[in-house]
Image (tube, helix red, strand yellow):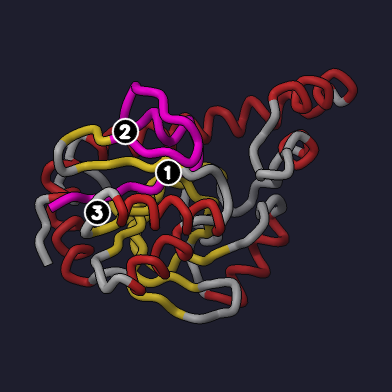
Amino acid sequence: MITGFVVALPEELSTLTAKKIAKGCCLFIADNKVIAYSGTGPENARLAAELLIHQGAKQLISWGCAAALDAALQPGNLVLATQLIDANQALLATDNDWLSFTQQKLQQHLTIQSGYLAESETLVASCSEKSRLRERTGAIAVDMESVAVAKVAKHYQMPFLAIRAIADPADMDLPKAISASLNTQGDVELSKLLLFILSHPVEIPGLIKLGLHFQAAKNTLKLVSKHLDDIVSFSA
């Protein structure tokens, strides 16, 4: 059975393969594993999930980083979503059997946090935004892509999992340089980032801190990736 992975960022992609993939394209990393590099946001994730279906995927994983909404979560913590909450407060379930199977495979290697994963259609940049989202949804973390992938999986009646590592904690405001350097596709443009830093050098410590947090999340995803053969061996 082929398992498809939707990955939004090149840094997240690097935790699964060293090969380069153009945005909007996919790559088989094994006969039973195919990755789609979606870019950020729900629509990109939906298109990537559909692409994976056309490549023969029979189950889908949303793979990457997330922002913590629960103050107990720290950078690098692994989150396996039990349910997802879309931007309109509708609930979507992950596959309970696959979730339990994956937890059993990973719990001897990693500490797992389970709970609701919320959707945001835009970047959640401030701790106050995270707090409001936590109060409104009860979710422990948030990302921009998992719900869209879950909806595609639901449409095709196939198993779905969200595997996410925490990059920024609930009490962290993202550096303003991040929002200032986003392009219309939601990606950080290096040239914009460097220009913003030049005129706002006070941003540098926050960017360094975020970089360290993001590296902790990547390290966790790399650990999980060592057990992909176990995870994808699930059969509904």
Q: Mark 3 to mark 2: distance in Å?
A: 17 Å
Give the residue number, with chain letter if any, for mark 1: 7
Comparing 121 with 152, the one in front is: 152
For residue 57, the mark is 3
Label 1 crowd bin: few (<14), some (14–19), many (20+), radius 10 Å: many
Is disc 2 surrounded by few (<14), some (14 to 19) or many (20+) residues within 10 Å?
many
Does the magenta run of residues contain 225?
A: no
Alpha-carbon distance for marks 1 and 2? Answer: 9 Å
The structure residue drawn at horizontal position 47% and vertical position 31%, both measured from the top left corner, is 22
* Dots 1, 2 in contact, CB < 8 A: yes
Chain-order first, disc 3 or disc 2 = 2
The disc label shown at residue 178, or none? none
Asked which secondary structure carries label 2, the reply is: loop
Q: 78 above or below 224?
A: below
Looking at the picture, how far across and down is residue 204, in whole percent? 74, 24
Q: Which residues are magenta?
A: 1-27
Tell me the residue that label 2 is attached to. Answer: 16
